Image (cartoon, rainbow, N blue to C red):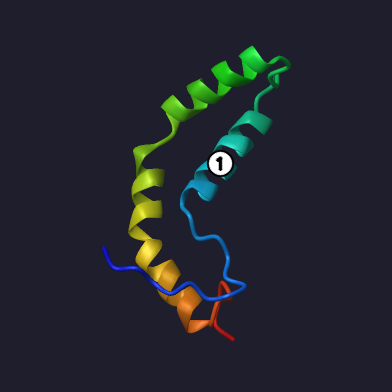
Amino acid sequence: MERMDWPARSPDLNPIEHVWDFLGRRLAARTLPPVTIRELRLALQDEWAAMPQQLIDTLILSMGRRCETCLAGRGRSYPY
């Protein structure tokens, strides 16, 4: 595995951040939001199971492009 130098002030490019955002939006869109920890756990499990595989595939396939963009911008999420 080749290690990539990570520029200072670079954004977190971890794809899981996008997954958490997706889950958070799905939970927020529910007509009855979870109130208890148990309800939250069950709701997250439901939303995780309903997450389209296409979302995961797209995030994985976009990693190279997003890393290149970050490096080209010297650590920023877009080049100046």
Whether 79 is drawn above or below 64: the answer is below
Q: Residue 49 at x, y = what percent? A: 42, 25
Within 10 Å of disc 1 (Cα), the crowding (few <14, some 14-19, many 20+) is: few
Q: Residue 38 at x, y = what percent? A: 62, 13
Whether 79 is drawn above or below 9: the answer is below
In this view, the residue farthest toward the bottom is 80
Whether 66 is drawn above or below 17: the answer is below
Q: Secondary structure at mark 1?
A: helix
State the quadrant of the N terminus.
bottom left
State the quadrant of the C terminus.
bottom right
| Residue denoted by label 1 | 20
Q: Residue 74 at x, y = what percent? A: 53, 82
In this view, the residue farthest toward the right is 35
Q: Residue at x 49, y 22 (%)?
A: 45
Q: Nearer the viewer, residue 63 or 4?
A: 4
User: Which quadrant of the view contains residue 26?
Assistant: top right
User: Which quadrant of the view contains residue 65?
Assistant: bottom left
Q: Residue at x 52, y 49 (%)?
A: 18
Q: Residue 9 at x, y = what percent? A: 62, 72
Q: Nearer the viewer, residue 4 or 16?
A: 4
Q: Residue at x 48, y 55 (%)?
A: 14
User: Which quadrant of the view contains residue 43?
Assistant: top right
Is residue 61 toward the left or the right of residue 74 in the image? left
Whether 62 is drawn above or below 53: the answer is below
Q: Amino acid at mark 1?
A: Trp
